[in-house]
Image: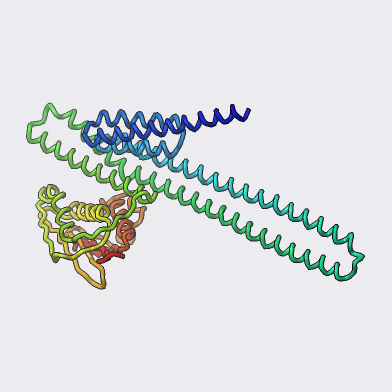
Amino acid sequence: MKAVFSIYLLLLITAGYSQAVNQHYYKVKSEDYLAQEKLKLAEQYADSALMIAINSNNDDSLAAAYELRLTVHEIKMDYQSALIDARMIVAHRDSAAQGRLRTVLAEAKFIQKQESQTHAGEVASLRDLIQNLERNKSEGQVSLLIILAALGILLLIVIIVLVRKTLQTRDLIEQSKVESRRLQSFKEMLSHLLGSNLKDSLSSFENMNKSLANQLETMNKEESIQFLRRIQATAAELKFKLSNVVEWVEYQADTNEITPVSIESKELVQKVITRLKGEIDEKKIITDVFMPDGQILFADRQMIETVLDNLVSNAIKHTPEGGAITFFAGRKHGLITVGVKDTGRGMTVEMISKLFTISSARTDQKGRGLGLVLSKELIERNGGRMYVDSKVGEGSSFYFSLPEGKL
């Protein structure tokens, strides 16, 4: 019987290992085809990895498979499928977290049960000791004192152990409750972000495509070019928002490691300006860079590029045609401060007070939302701080300070 059970257990382990190997193989193949820009093949292998994950019924494997599909759909600009993938990632991560929560609670109950059994054995031993001592009580008062002393010491030990284990169990349960509340809050915030930050942009993009399809035959060449440029701008904005949502989710899940390096602040700003030059030239915006050469800050390059992309994109959006965006930097007390100033409408004190909260990203009425929330979190994660200074009619200035040297 033991031999049959061992063979069955070995078959189960082998099957699970085979599924993991197959899923990893399809994942690697999909990433290879993505690198070769063979999107159809990349999507087929991503779907195969998902099917294996579905058969495994493992939430972590399912979340990883949907993350692979999200990357493929984002590159294909299939944003509705990407939105579904993002929701499935959250659902399976939530399910995996709840499973871990149930495991912690089960372990706590198991520990409490074991301790109860241990204490029962200690009490039985104590009872036996008392009975033995009572049988020898004729030996005199000394024996009675020994019994009382032993009883007192043993009871004290039992009480100490009980209190300590009860406190440990209570701490485990409290930690589980805190984690459960955090997951629920994260789930609600992500639901709002997916609904408010992407739904309108997806609808706008879909409506523009429908309008182009209906009016294409009646448009002249110039009108078609202008319409296609609007669609391209909307698609770029949608991709930017989707990237912010994905990066924010990864930040909340703490999956992105920080890799700080030495960065020349002026070179980084000029790189972002070059990347967004098309949007800057389209609105005839003047860019002035007042930053000394050689000012080095120490942070994760990709994260700080994301911050600058958000700040400059917001500045372009809120600067009128023919306006100006100014970049400046300074050094004080071992910190490098970088600033981006626009000549837009500016903001009220009330708008500034809500600027870096997740609630402002729900409505996104002024075009500022999750990007600024994400930027502030990335700056703080790199050991820095972010500030804003704005007045209605006088534009807005956003600053962030980061360490000059290695922390």
Q: Of 86 and 147, which appears nearest the observer? A: 147
Number of marks drawn: 0
Residue 161 in view: yes
**Residue depicted at 16% across the width and 55% down the height:** 319
Residue 350 in view: no
**Residue depicted at 42% across the width and 46% down the height:** 187
Q: Of 364 and 168, which appears nearest the observer? A: 168
Whether residue 197 is situated above or below residue 398 in the rendered picture:
above
Q: Most extreme residue toward the front, as rendered?
A: 3
**Residue depicted at 38% across the width and 51% down the height:** 254
- The spot of residue 12 in percent (x, y) is 51, 30
| 48 to the left or right of 388 | right
- Locate the N terminus by quadrant: top right
- Locate the C terminus by quadrant: bottom left
Q: Most extreme residue toward the bottom, as rendered?
A: 333
Whether residue 172 is situated above or below residue 7 in the rendered picture:
below
Q: Of 138 and 218, which appears nearest the observer? A: 138
**Residue depicted at 29% across the width and 32% down the height:** 29
- The spot of residue 314 in percent (x, y) is 22, 53
Query: What colour scheme governs how the chains and residues are painted in the rendered image of this protein?
Result: rainbow
- The spot of residue 287 in percent (x, y) is 11, 58
- The spot of residue 4 in percent (x, y) is 59, 27
Q: Most extreme residue toward the left, as rendered?
A: 221
